[in-house]
Image (cartoon, rainbow, N blue to C red):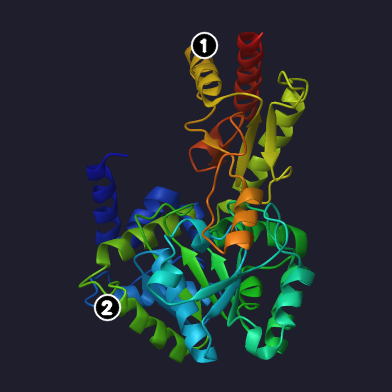
Amino acid sequence: MEAFEGIRRTAQYAEDPISYLQNTLGMETFESRKSMLSLPETVDMDRYGTGEHRQHFEQHIAKLLGKQHGLFFITGIQAQLAALKTHAERAGKTKLAWHVSSHLEFAEARSFEELYGLERLLLGSNPEALPTVDEIKEVLSLPKEERPATILIEVPNRVLGCKTYTVADLESISSACREAAVAFHMDGARIWEIEPYYQATAGKSFVDIAALFDTAYVSFYKGLGGVSGAMLVSNDESLIDEARLWQQRAGGKAFTLGYEVIDDERGFNENIGTFARKRDKMIEVIDAVKAATAEYKAMDGSTIVNFLPEKPTCCQTHTVFEGYTVEQLVEARDRVKAKTNVSVFYRVRPKENMEAAGKKIHAEDGQADMEAVDGKRHFVEWMIMSVTENIETQVFVDAYAELCKELIGKAS
């Protein structure tokens, strides 16, 4: 989308949110989703965090997640670290705990340490898997002075292909945290995408999941398609007030975030309520692609097309290609596109060597360094969005099968 088109869309929403949504969604969809939508009476530009529209949006998102208070941030890094620092100060500790795959570990240039003076304790023994309930409970059973102030888990875990915990596991971890007097925080950057999994497997909603956590951060620019922004939610008003102070200290209390709030609310309203069917579509596509490509093997005997996890939890997943270099994959993709006008992927990345990163951290107490496992294992991170949702499943199947044929033919 061109910049002016995005700005024009945001301006149209700001002028009349209800009319915009009725026209964009259609009257029938608008009415069916109305209880979930954030429908402001006034759209204004906040000033240093105060404004009728911003406060309405904060309250709506908090309520949707079963919390009483919300605070909008320009980035998720600011939102999450404000929560973690507040939990740490309240506990009188500097140590917190998360898995090696956490966003804080490899994508934030050690801001938790350099800017906030926090330390971390790694959860779990397997860098390629979620920390088990027992492993988390083991940390919570440490002597009181050695326990972390907060346990952080990502729901779902993006680096691990959106793997996630069952409701029973979350309930068990939550209970153990409360017994140990340790705060439980959710990195819910993709909570919108994963909620249908909990609905399908346990009949649980946003409220049910968020109720297990003391604080949660959510994002608006990923699956929701907002321009930029995040929110921290909690039932504790004083905690939100303390987080607001850390927001200011981090330079996040801008003169106005009105544009971001408006566009994030637009994106939220357009996409909330769509993720269950997008999840269903992803499951259908992956099942069909796996069946169609199972026979294709690389020179080393490995299956060329794999998925992480094997069965998707939500509308986002990883496709893992085995046995070929980036150059071979890209060349094969381009040949398939020339023949079919379908591009199987946009960009491939080397599959992170989580095991090596974990060993390095445990050995050196250093930052996670995500390295490629080798030169012939790569992945594509992708999701079913509103556009791709309408593509017939057979189109995906044929494109992946053609890619495999091109790879095998070129290799031989």
Q: Quick check: can you spot residue 258?
A: yes
Q: Amino acid at mark 1?
A: Lys
Residue at the disc numbered 1: 339
Does 12 sit above or below residue 250? above
Q: Which circle's residue, 1 or 2, is located before the other in the chain?
A: 2
Number of callouts: 2
Residue 293 at x, y = what percent? 72, 24
Residue in the picture at 61% in, 34% down: 374
Residue in the picture at 51% in, 43% down: 385
Crowd class of label 1 (few under 14; some 14 to 19; many from 20; radius 10 Å): few
Q: Quadrant of the N terminus?
A: top left
Residue at the disc numbered 2: 51
Is 409 on the left or on the right of 60, as rendered?
right
Label 1: element kind: helix
Residue 45 at x, y = what percent? 22, 70
Residue 187 at x, y = what percent? 55, 66
Residue 184 at x, y = what percent? 61, 78
Q: Amino acid at mark 2?
A: Gly
Q: Nearer the viewer, residue 105 or 10?
A: 105
Does 257 sit above or below residue 288? below
Label 2: element kind: loop
Does 18 sit above or below residue 349? below
Q: Are marks 1 and 2 in contact (CB under 8 Å)?
A: no
**Mark toward the viewer: 1 or 2:** 1
Query: Which mark is on residue 10?
Result: none
